Image: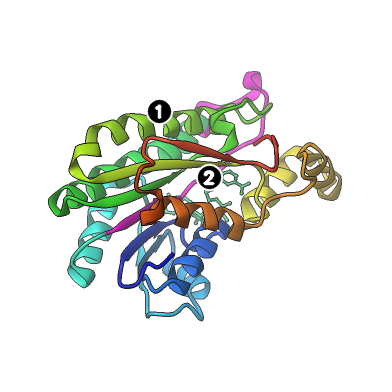
């Protein structure tokens, strides 16, 4: 696969999956625009990446920030070929009778409104080009339940619903829209889930999460990046509106 001179925009690019995805596309010749909340963490994450990527701080829940990151990308590169709609949070790990409205709103704001706003403004640009590929970051939690994570699970079910609908809207514009559904990936997000779930014994929590996966381990972020780059590539030209499990045979989260 080659993304030589293709413009790839990635949100949540300072995090585990975003960074690994940026590395994957950079190695295949892409021009990168990377978005995350803070410029300093983004600068650290982008150290050593080829191609002098454009680094943009933005909160994906704020429409003005989303408009600005799309505009800055188009001003620098003239187009957007691939959009990896990846930024997300897991929120608090609590049974439903202890959940708060605040936690639900936070999680839905980032994972649903952030995904919606990215699509809204990137798709407008891709329609003007009559081409583009989007990969939305869902989760196995968008297909299954996960005790204590109802807010996150609701948000990722929503991502899959948005993914299916938008794919149908834009197919005749030459734009493909797909989603990936990982189970536990070895990133900061799993550290946070282990802490939330463990009541002080993170190592034990990790062991039991990994034991629940038929392949017996978390995914590496680079393994998720492989699927993202395949779905964004011309080799996936007949795939749209799809959502792929990447879960070692059936892990949760
Ligand atoms: P991570 O915590 O390492 O990275 C997430 C990144 O998103 C961080 O850099 C964070 O700063 C950024 N972000 C959060 N809120 C933001 C906002 N409002 N605006 C801009 N950026 C924001 O987590 P990760 O594992 O790399 O997760 C990436 C995506 O993959 C998320 O959507 C997550 O739900 C999904 N996912 C992760 C796992 C997993 O086990 N790690 C499994 C399935 C799906």
Q: Which of 184 and 214 is in front in this view?
A: 214
Q: Do the residues labelled 2 and 1 touch (CB within 8 Å)?
A: no
Q: Is residue 16 above or below residue 216?
A: below
Q: Does the residue labelled 2 lie within 8 Å of ligand 1?
A: yes
Residue positioned 43% across, 59% down in the render: 37
**Marking on residue 241:** none
Q: In this view, does 71 lie above or below 216?
A: below
Residue 118 percent location from the top left of the image: 31, 47
Task: Characterize the local packing of mark 2: few (<14), some (14-19) or many (20 or more) Cα atoms within 10 angstroms.
Answer: some
Question: What segment is highlighted magenta in the picture?
Answer: 81-103
Residue positioned 77% across, 39% down in the render: 214
Q: In which quarter of the image is the N terminus?
A: bottom left
Q: Does the residue labelled 1 lie within 8 Å of ligand 1?
A: no
Residue positioned 18% across, 42% down in the render: 173
Kindly indicate the quadrant of the structure image that contains residue 116.
top left
Q: What residue is pinned by disc 1?
A: 161
CA–CA distance between discs 2 and 1? 18 Å
Q: Which of 19 and 176 is in front in this view?
A: 176
Kindly indicate the quadrant of the structure image that contains residue 249.
top right
User: Magenta stretch: residue 101 in it?
Assistant: yes
Q: What residue is pinned by disc 2?
A: 89
Q: Between disc 2 and disc 1, whose residue precedes?
A: 2
């Amino acid at each position: 696969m080659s993304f030589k001179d293709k413009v790839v925009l990635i949100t949540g690019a300072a995090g585990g999956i975003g960074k690994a995805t940026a590395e994957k596309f950079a190695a295949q010749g892409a021009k990168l625009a990377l978005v995350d909340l803070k410029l300093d963490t983004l600068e650290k994450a982008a150290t050593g990446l080829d191609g002098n990527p454009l680094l943009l701080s933005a909160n994906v829940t704020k429409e003005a920030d989303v408009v600005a990151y799309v505009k800055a990308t188009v001003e620098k590169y003239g187009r957007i070929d691939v959009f990896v709609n990846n930024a997300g949070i897991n929120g608090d790990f609590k049974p439903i009778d202890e959940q708060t409205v605040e936690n639900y709103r936070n999680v839905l704001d980032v994972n649903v409104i952030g995904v919606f706003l990215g699509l809204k403004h990137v798709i407008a640009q891709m329609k003007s080009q009559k081409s583009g590929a989007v990969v939305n970051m869902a989760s196995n939690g968008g297909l299954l339940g996960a005790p204590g994570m109802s807010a996150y699970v609701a948000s990722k079910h929503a991502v899959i619903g948005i993914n299916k609908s938008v794919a149908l809207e834009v197919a005749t514009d030459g734009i493909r829209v797909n989603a990936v559904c990982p189970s536990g990936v070895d990133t900061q997000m799993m550290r946070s889930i282990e802490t939330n779930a463990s009541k002080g014994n993170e190592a034990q929590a990790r062991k039991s999460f990994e034991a629940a996966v038929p392949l017996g381990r978390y995914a590496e972020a680079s393994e998720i990046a492989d699927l993202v780059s395949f779905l964004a590539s011309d080799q996936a030209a007949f795939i749209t509106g799809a959502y792929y499990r990447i879960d070692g045979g059936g892990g949760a989260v």
